[in-house]
Structure formats: structure tokens, C-alpha cells
Amino acid sequence: MSARKIEQSRKQQKIISERVNRLSPSGIRKFFDLLASMEEVISLGVGEPDYATPWHISEAAVRSLEKGYTMYTSNSGMPELREETARYLEEKYGIKYEPFGEILITVGVSEAMDLALRAILNPGDEVIMPDPHYVAYDSCVILAGGEPVMVPTSQENNFEVDAGDIEARITDKARAILIGYPANPTGAVMSRDKLLAIAEVAKRHNLMVVSDEIYARLVYGVEHTCFAGLPGVRENTILLGGFSKAYAMTGWRIGYAAAPKEIITAMTKIHQYTIMSAPTMAQVAAIEALKTGEPDVLEMVEDYNRRRLIIVKGLNDIGMPCFEPKGAFYAFPSIKSTGMTSEEFSEKLLTEEKVAVVPGSAFGECGEGYVRCCYATSLADIEEALTRMKRFVKKYKK
């Protein structure tokens, strides 16, 4: 780099805040940019359903537009949507939340995560989280003024975080535990007993728990345990959920947070100054999803399960060892036999075989040596991708 460019870089760093300068560009977006410039690529990279939003859900939003429902809603969200969300959480998980005070409708779970962390963190507070983890977790902590503290997980323990490992990392600066199960990128699901152990650690040390449960409905052969429904932790849990994954509504950008009134009030303060309210037509669609979308969810989960079994067996057969994911729609196979880094593997696979996966390093240090494969795509594409990957692994396996 020339002296002039170095000087320009230094000036830019002085202009941009230290928090933002600490953030790394998303490792996922880099590969999406490469993908956009190539033809005939099979993508196992994009973490979203390949289904269109069920028409009856979209139609509800269309009708709202036809009727002129294009104004702001309450900062907290439409009363009916908060009521339906409260009903859903009680019926599904047995947890009671007051619709008017303990539920906030947000622009996706991403905004809910940002609000939750900004509402509870003071500068320097530590947030303990598993590694690997969804790409936004540590960045959201940093932007809120906190410090992320990683707890390593591995394929040997199915990428489930251990309560003892969490407790070993608690200092006097610890403020919260951040978990997300079913997990992105690994597909791991935590058992009730293991979550109970984490709950006991949180209670013992008076820590908040932020539980990202966006993939709660996408589980296979197991039951999802809602963290806030565990004994004695509702009052120090911020439950995050949404509609993107289960209802194939990623682009609608609609989610929610459920927590004690004091916390929701604090989150709403930030929300009202930065967002105002979630899009009205998306809220109408979410109401329809909660009222009538259950058959659609069950149909999609059944289909994802078929794809899950095929891709996991296929990856193991071609020499990419993969534990069985029990949730979400990701497989997280090892690529260690090739001797490549996950980024090298992903770049070469894309350029040589036109298959897009995401390097595990994008999700933390413990993701190195793995790649994320999203199976929310057609069976035909999954089978063709496996054929190409088999050829690739055979070529580079050491």
C-alpha cells in the first residue's frame, strides 16, 4: 500500500467511530457479491427459505394496502399483532406475556437483538456467547458498547454450549449470556436439561439471558425448549422471535421481543427514536401468519427434513464429516481433510465447481475448518451440488 493510501486510511479511521472500525465486514456478504457475478451457480449459501410467502399471508397485506392501511402504527406494534403473539407464546410454550407492555414488534429479529443489547449494556459490559455463532451477535454487542466473550463449542459435542464453560468465563464485568438455539450456522439444538443448567448459571450470577429463537419452529425429531419458559428465568430473559424462517417471510422484516415490562419499555425508547414502528403491511401479514399459517409451517418443516437427511448423508459419504443437525436448515460439515482454510475452500469450490457455501470462519474462530451449507433449496440442486462437491473433495483431499 502506498504512503498516500495509508494516510487516507488513517484519516478515515479518525472520522469513523472506534466501535465501527472494530467491526469486520460480513464474511457472508463477500460470497454473495461473488455469486452475483457468476452464472449457473448452485447456492447453498443464502440462509432463507426457498419458498415464497404463502399466498393467504401475502394477500392479507395486499388487502391492507387496498384499504389504505399505510399509516404508522403504535410504536410497540399493532395491538392485534401483540395479542396474537402473546396467544401464540402461551399456547405453544406455556409462557404468559402481557400484550400491552411486555411485547414489542420490531423490524425483524435483527432489530430486536440490537435493541435488547443497547437497552441492557453499559460500556465495557461483557456478553458471553457460543462460538461459532450467527455473524451479527458479536457485532451487535460491540455496537452497544459491550465486549463479546466467546465460549468454544465443537463438532465432538454437537456444537452445544456447556453451562460450566459459560460459568468459567464469568467476571465482575459480565452482564448477559447470548444464545441462539436452534443455531445458525450449525443446526445444533440444545436439550431442556442443558438449557436448565445455563438457566441456573444465569440465576446464580444475576445475568440477563438474550435468547434468539428465530428458528424455534424448524426442529426435526426433537422438541424446541423455549428458554423463557424454564423455571425461574422469565424475569431475566429477553425472548426474541419472528416470522422470517418458519413462515418464509424474510423480506417482510418483522419480528418481536418478549420480556418483562421494564426491559420492553427501555427497548421501546430506542425503537421509537430510530424506527418509529415496523411496516404496517408486514404487521398485517404477521397477524394472518399467526392466525392461519400453522399448516404452511408444518408442510415446510416436513420438506426441510427430507432435504436435511439427504444432504447430511451425502456430505458424510463424500468425505465431509457432518454431525446431524436437529434444527434450522443448515449443515456444518468439516473440510479439514482438504488442508484448506474455510475461506480458501469456499472460494475454490465457487470458482471451480460453481457451488456456493459460506466459510465457517465467518461465524467465529471455532467455525474454521467447516463450511455452512443451507439446505433450504430444491432437492435437485442439493443432489447436483453434492455431485460437484464430491469431485472437488476427491481432487483436494490429502
Image (cartoon, rainbow, N blue to C red):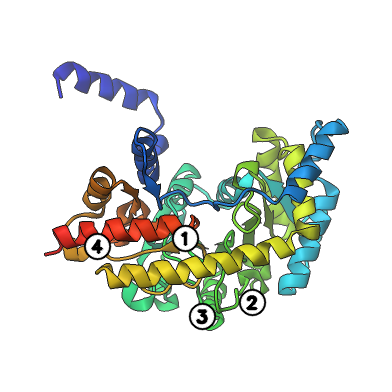
For residue 267, side relative to residue 80 (left or right)? left
Q: Position of residue 75 (x, y in %)?
A: 76, 40
Mark 3 surroundings within 10 Å by alpha-carbon count, few (fewer than 14), some (14 through 19), many (20 or more): few
Q: Which residue is mark 3?
A: 197
Q: Any mark on residue 379, and which?
A: 1
Q: How many marks?
A: 4
Q: Any mark on residue 230, and which?
A: 2
Q: Any mark on residue 335, and which?
A: 4
Mark 2 surroundings within 10 Å by alpha-carbon count, few (fewer than 14), some (14 through 19), many (20 or more): some
Mark 1 against mark 3, which lies toward the viewer?
Answer: 1
Quarter assignment of residue 214: bottom right
Under circle 3, the secondary element is helix
Image quarter (top left, top right, bottom left or bottom right) of the C terminus: bottom left
Q: Is residue 247 above or below residue 73?
A: below
Q: Mark 4 and mark 2: span between their CA atoms?
A: 37 Å
Nearest the eye: 393 or 119: 393
